Image (cartoon, coloured by chain):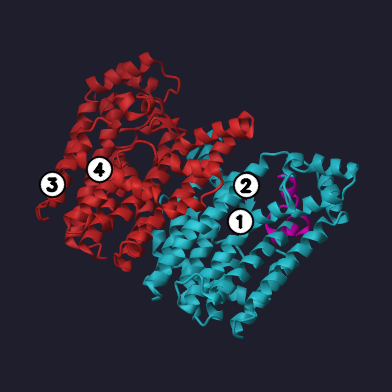
Chain colours: A cyan, B red
């Protein structure tokens, strides 16, 4: 989507100009705080915030600081999640805790144990700093581009109460699920899994739609009909996004994704793909899935075997169907929003959420 | 101080009424987020915020939401610091990551390895939630008690840019220092150590003074002379507070402190006490200090031996002197503030900072 590419530039430029950076010290923290931001990324959350603002009549410049804010907010959740999941790669390069583990060795001459601890400690503090930095961008929505301060306070309040509580709820369920074996982990229903996707991912898209709509319409009323319509649209697209992400995690292109395909399988991630495949599997196939899922050292052949099972047993096609269902659920929310360039862009964006290949 | 006891009740009551709590899920996160708050504590930061507001003519009720905010903000830094330092106790009970490690074993039947991981993961997310909750309290300063929203936005901006950047800078230096042995760690000057105390502790006291003064005077101008005076007063008292804390960490009363005396020594904490003692030590005494400092399994006799050395070699008395110097530096900042009940309380509070025994 051309609009996304244009906005990526605007958002990154706005972030780069931030005064907050000059306070961020020492160098390791500064490097860790900025590294994910400066890597290639899609900026889907800030873009939907800008489009949501536009579709209710707001100028793009009014949405730009909050767009930067939602991107930074997303970034701190990535840093803490990557630490919790002990992921190795993010956007094609080492995760923050891995990067700082390496820096601990090369620059501080730490031994393996201390370097690992240093990486973890710096990653915790990095996410904390990014969280705070995100809040300062929202503040600029009032102090730099002149949006009514009560609208801005309501936006920050939503983010820092309901939204974050839901994100953390979702992440905690995910942590708990990760502690169960493959078999035990599937005492959860498909609805439980989709609800977790909503909590972990949908809510921040929902927030981006909400914040953009409030700025665009110039209201602090979160129950306004149009605001609510845009919010629900973004929320459903967000859940669809995560379903598509799970698909790409199994059958996507490593180069494009910036992370090894198969890592979701090795981590034993409990997705609707696995759920559906298990539902349709015979005993032998079930055993194969249980045997490979969550196996840290699964071979290339193991991954191929389980990927084929996920395809054969309709895990992929069913999840694709679910993602499309969420997009179909999202679209009618825009029915009563007046036609505009931004409404068209939102509809294109919805389509992109499930047709993207990275 | 009677005022502190009264305010402790007000602050806790305000926190307990917060709507945000109903969003915090699941139960483990809720329990972890609230546990430190509901333990016995001095509430020195919120109290100085209220007094700072009062001494520039503001009603206490205007300062109460921000007082709750600074307490919550302090709390998340404790949770993440305790995790980073792997401390066992906080306010007389297990730290969050320890508590949740135990809960992981007893309620989720996790093995030792997974329970430890669960405790760490929940502690990261707990601090994140408390950070966000803190921000919502500051917002209520505008939306619930009617302070000008631009003042509130400036207060949150200060907190989420300069203040947190300094806290994290201080914590990172502390993490790096902790990775050096006792000998290497003292290639730092006394000024370096005191600067770290300012960064880790002074800045949040400084912020509490600043925020209270801005609310009290009704200004968003952080360069206002009176605002600046109160801020500098609080900042210097904050550094004195931490010096006194280091003293209590060596010669304090375990019961009163809620943590074992000697833990600073076992952790190898680099304080002005150690610095001064080393400066005055002969070779034998130096070796004794290097040998025991940072020794995780130091015996009761070891602790007694090093404590005696710290006393004999003027480590304690010199640090006491430094703390008094900071209080003497703080007091004249209030010279041009008009006399009032709150000014008197601030002066009493300054005295309490270095004469407290817990």
Q: In this view, does B302 lie above or below A175?
A: above
Local secondary structure at mark 4? helix
Sooner in the amino-acid sequence: mark 1 or mark 2: 2
Q: Which mark is residue A199?
A: 1
- Location of residue B276 in the rendering, given as x and y in whole percent from the top left corner: 25, 29
Q: Distance between the residues labelled 1 and 4?
A: 40 Å
The quadrant of the image that shows the C terminus of chain A is bottom right
Q: How far apart are marks 1 and 2 (CA)?
A: 10 Å
Mark 3 and mark 1: span between their CA atoms?
A: 50 Å
Q: Do the residues under discs 1 and 2 have CB atoms within 8 angstroms? A: yes
Marks 3 and 1 share the same chain: no
Image mark 2: chain: A
Per the model, the C-alpha gap separating discs 2 and 3 is: 51 Å
Residue A139 x/y as whole percent: 40, 66
Towards the viewer: B66 or A178: B66
Q: How many labels does the image show?
A: 4
* Residue for badge 2: A173
Residue B238 higher or lower than A232, as above or below: above
Label 3 sits on residue: B344
Q: How crowded is mark 2: few (under 14 residues within 10 Å), some or many (20 or more)?
A: some
Instruction: Evaluate if marks 1 and 4 touch, with contact meaning CB atoms under 8 Å apart.
Output: no
Residues rendered magenta in the picture = A247-267
Q: Do the CB atoms of the residues marked 4 and 3 lie less than 8 Å apart?
A: no
Q: Quick check: do tags 2 and 3 share a chain?
A: no
Check if mark 2 and mark 4 are on a common chain: no
Circles 2, 3 touching at the beta carbon (< 8 Å): no
B214 w.r.t. A219: above or below: above
State the residue position of label 4.
B6
Q: Which of marks 2 and 4 is in front?
A: 4
Q: Is residue B277 toward the left or the right of residue A20 in the image?
A: left
């Amino acid at each position: 989507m051309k609009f996304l590419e244009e906005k990526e530039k605007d958002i990154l430029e706005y972030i780069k100009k931030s005064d907050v950076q000059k306070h961020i010290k020492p160098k390791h923290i500064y490097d860790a705080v900025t590294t994910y931001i400066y890597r290639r990324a899609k900026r889907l959350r800030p873009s939907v915030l800008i489009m949501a603002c536009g579709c209710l009549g707001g100028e793009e410049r009014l949405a730009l600081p909050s767009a930067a804010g939602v991107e930074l907010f997303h970034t701190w959740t990535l840093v803490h999640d990557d630490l919790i999941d002990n992921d190795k790669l993010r956007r094609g390069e080492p995760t923050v805790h891995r990067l700082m583990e390496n820096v601990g060795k090369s620059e501080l001459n730490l031994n393996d144990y201390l370097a690992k601890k240093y990486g973890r400690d710096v990653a915790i503090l990095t996410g904390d700093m990014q969280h705070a930095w995100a809040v300062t961008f929202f503040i600029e929505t009032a102090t730099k581009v002149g949006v009514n301060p009560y609208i801005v306070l309501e936006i920050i309040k939503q983010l820092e109460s309901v939204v974050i509580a839901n994100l953390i709820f979702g992440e905690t369920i995910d942590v708990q699920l990760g502690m169960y074996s493959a078999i035990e982990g599937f005492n959860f229903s498909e609805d439980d899994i989709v609800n977790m996707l909503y909590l972990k991912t949908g809510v921040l898209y929902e927030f981006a739609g909400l914040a953009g709509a409030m700025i665009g319409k110039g209201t602090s009323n979160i129950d306004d009909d149009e605001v609510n319509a845009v919010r629900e649209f973004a929320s459903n697209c967000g859940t669809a996004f995560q379903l598509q992400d799970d698909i790409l995690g199994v059958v996507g292109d490593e180069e494009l994704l910036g992370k090894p395909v198969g890592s979701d399988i090795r981590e034993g991630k409990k997705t609707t793909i696995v759920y559906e495949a298990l539902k349709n599997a015979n005993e032998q196939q079930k055993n194969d899935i249980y045997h490979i899922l969550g196996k840290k050292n699964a071979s290339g052949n193991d991954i191929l075997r389980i990927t084929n099972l996920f395809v054969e047993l309709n895990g992929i096609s069913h999840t694709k169907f679910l993602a499309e269902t969420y997009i179909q659920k999202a679209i009618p929310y825009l029915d009563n929003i007046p036609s505009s360039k931004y409404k068209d862009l939102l509809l294109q964006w919805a389509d992109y959420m499930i047709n993207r290949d990275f």
